[in-house]
């Protein structure tokens, strides 16, 4: 990836099915071994009633990273519409519980979301995560922040995911992001 102009990598650490993503963790290790300096991970929460608690999901992700010998600059909570309950208050509490566990384990962490997902999951008026960095997902094909519409207390994102499912090096699928 580095030889193809990619300067950072963010790999999945935990799946929305409630399980650790071992391949994603291996990809994190591979990115570091390839010389990519900026390597993060993301956690796609499991939000149904049969899922482990928010703290358990974070703990399992952390244990898997450590046991694999993988390290990340930061972990991102992937907050997008997929099996989230309709109760904004409970969803806010769920995200707060994940954040509390990440903080207690010593991780630097941020939020992956966009205007529509945030509105649907927690409501646009909730600013409880605005002190965290935002990885903004809007597939507009533009590697910039020009069309960012403020939400959740964020006035500017840190990263913009601007294309999804692009064929990357070695013919695997990647989402392209801009990190100024």
Image (cartoon, grey):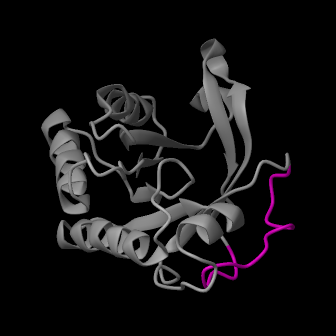
Predominant secondary structure, magenta span: loop
Q: Which residues are magenta?
A: 142-156
Residue depicted at x 63% and y 24%: 173
- The quarter of the rendered structure image containing the N terminus is top right
Q: Position of residue 61 (x, y in %)?
A: 24, 47
**Closer to us: 18 or 158:** 18
Residue depicted at x 29% and y 47%: 71
Q: Position of residue 138 (x, y in %)?
A: 75, 54
Vertical side of 28 occupied by 78: above or below: below
Q: Is residue 169 left or right of residue 102?
A: right
Q: Position of residue 9 (x, y in %)?
A: 52, 41
Q: Is residue 180 left or right of residue 25?
A: right
Tally of numbered tags: 0
**Closer to us: 78 or 142:** 78
Residue depicted at x 53% and y 73%: 122
**Closer to us: 5 or 152:** 152
Q: Position of residue 133 (x, y in %)?
A: 52, 72
């Amino acid at each position: 990836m580095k030889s193809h102009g990619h300067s950072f990598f963010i790999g999945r650490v935990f799946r929305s099915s409630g399980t650790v993503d071992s391949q994603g963790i291996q990809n994190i290790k591979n990115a570091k071994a390839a010389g990519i300096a900026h390597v993060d991970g993301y956690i796609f929460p499991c939000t149904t009633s049969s899922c482990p608690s928010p703290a358990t999901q974070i703990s399992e992700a952390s244990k898997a990273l450590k046991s694999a010998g993988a390290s990340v600059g930061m972990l991102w909570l992937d907050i997008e519409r997929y099996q989230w309950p309709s109760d904004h208050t409970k969803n806010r509490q769920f995200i707060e519980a994940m954040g509390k566990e990440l903080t207690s384990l010593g991780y630097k962490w941020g939020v992956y979301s966009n205007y529509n997902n945030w509105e649907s999951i927690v409501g646009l008026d909730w600013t409880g995560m605005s002190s965290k960095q935002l990885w903004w997902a809007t597939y507009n094909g533009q590697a910039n922040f020009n069309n960012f519409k403020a939400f959740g207390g964020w006035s500017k994102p840190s990263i913009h995911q601007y294309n999804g499912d692009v064929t990357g090096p070695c013919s695997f699928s990647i989402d392209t992001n801009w990190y100024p």
